Image: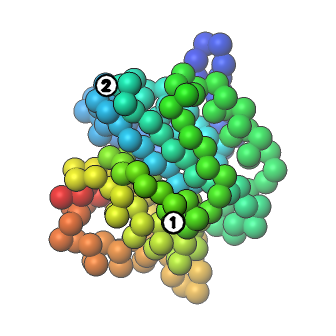
């Protein structure tokens, strides 16, 4: 278990995934993919314990117009994620201590329902929700609709060995990119993958 964060509170990161992730290394690098001081409209699909949510809130919502929306139904039966009752509890505890809590909106619902009612656009979308092929494809197709020009779509678990009927997240993402290659350029590829909207 890893604890990190502000001096007064350290975020619970049971698995230690986030600080080892490619998105963290790109956000925290010498030339980060997001500006800390520009307006950032961030959408996160899938939060788990909220460690990524907290990092984004604390570091990329400094502009008065910046905001973050995170969507997660916390379904215990998601076969692609090791979900249990403590995950949501840790999420709520973590996000209650972020620096810009007033700029965070938490939607406890399936992403399909969220997208159906969403009216906002975003310059950064992080997809780490359901790994089921149908759900992932929906998340990608709906995300591209609300991603602003020059916005970044960052997708977790591209290199995961999880599959449904022999269809992996990589298969889904590759199919999506093939259909959207005229409007996207790939900017990162590894265990995670990222695209910029043209």
- What element does badge 2 sit on? loop
Query: Residue 67's spot in the image, x, y percent?
Result: 44, 36
| Relative vertical location of residue 125 with respect to residue 76 in this rendering, above or below | above
- What element does badge 1 sit on? helix
| Relative vertical location of residue 182 with respect to residue 9 in this rendering, above or below | below
Looking at the image, the residue that sits furthest to the bottom is 165
- In this rendering, the label closer to the viewer, 2 or 1: 1
Mark 1 — residue? 116
131 lies left or right of 193: right
| Relative vertical location of residue 177 with respect to residue 85 in this rendering, above or below | below
Q: Quadrant of the image for the N terminus? A: top right
Q: Nearer the viewer, residue 161 or 106?
A: 106
Label 2 CA crowd tier, 10 Å (few <14, some 14–19, many 20+): few
Q: Earlier in the sequence, mark 2 or mark 1?
A: 2
Q: CA distance from mark 2 to mark 1?
A: 30 Å
Query: Residue 76's spot in the image, x, y percent?
Result: 77, 61
| Relative vertical location of residue 29 with respect to residue 135 in this rendering, above or below | above
Mark 2 — residue? 37
The answer to whether residue 159 shows anywhere in this view is no
Q: Nearer the viewer, residue 5 or 126?
A: 126
Name the residue at 22% across, 71% down: 181
The answer to whether residue 152 shows anywhere in this view is yes
Label 1 CA crowd tier, 10 Å (few <14, some 14–19, many 20+): few
Name the residue at 52% across, 61% down: 117
Query: Residue 86's spot in the image, x, y percent?
Result: 80, 45
Quarter holding residue 31: top left
Q: Are marks 2 and 1 in contact (CB under 8 Å)?
A: no
Query: Residue 148's spot in the image, x, y percent?
Result: 28, 52
């Amino acid at each position: 278990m890893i604890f990190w964060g502000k001096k007064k509170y350290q975020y619970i990161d049971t698995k230690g995934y986030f600080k080892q992730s490619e998105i963290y290394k790109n956000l925290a690098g010498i030339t980060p993919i997001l500006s800390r001081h520009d307006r950032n409209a961030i959408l996160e699909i899938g939060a788990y314990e909220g460690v990524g949510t907290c990092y984004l809130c604390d570091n990329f919502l400094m502009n008065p117009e910046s905001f973050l929306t995170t969507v997660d139904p916390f379904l215990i039966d998601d076969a692609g994620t090791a979900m249990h009752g403590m995950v949501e509890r840790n999420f709520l505890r973590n996000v209650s201590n972020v620096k810009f809590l007033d700029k965070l909106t938490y939607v406890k619902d399936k992403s399909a329902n969220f997208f159906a009612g969403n009216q906002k656009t975003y310059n950064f979308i992080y997809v780490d929700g359901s790994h089921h092929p149908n759900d992932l494809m929906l998340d990608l197709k709906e995300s591209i609709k609300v991603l602003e020009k020059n916005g970044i779509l960052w997708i977790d678990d591209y290199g995961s060995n999880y599959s449904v009927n022999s269809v992996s997240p990589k298969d889904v993402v590759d199919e999506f990119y093939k259909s959207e290659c005229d409007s996207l350029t790939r900017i990162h590829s590894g265990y995670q993958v990222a695209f910029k909207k043209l």
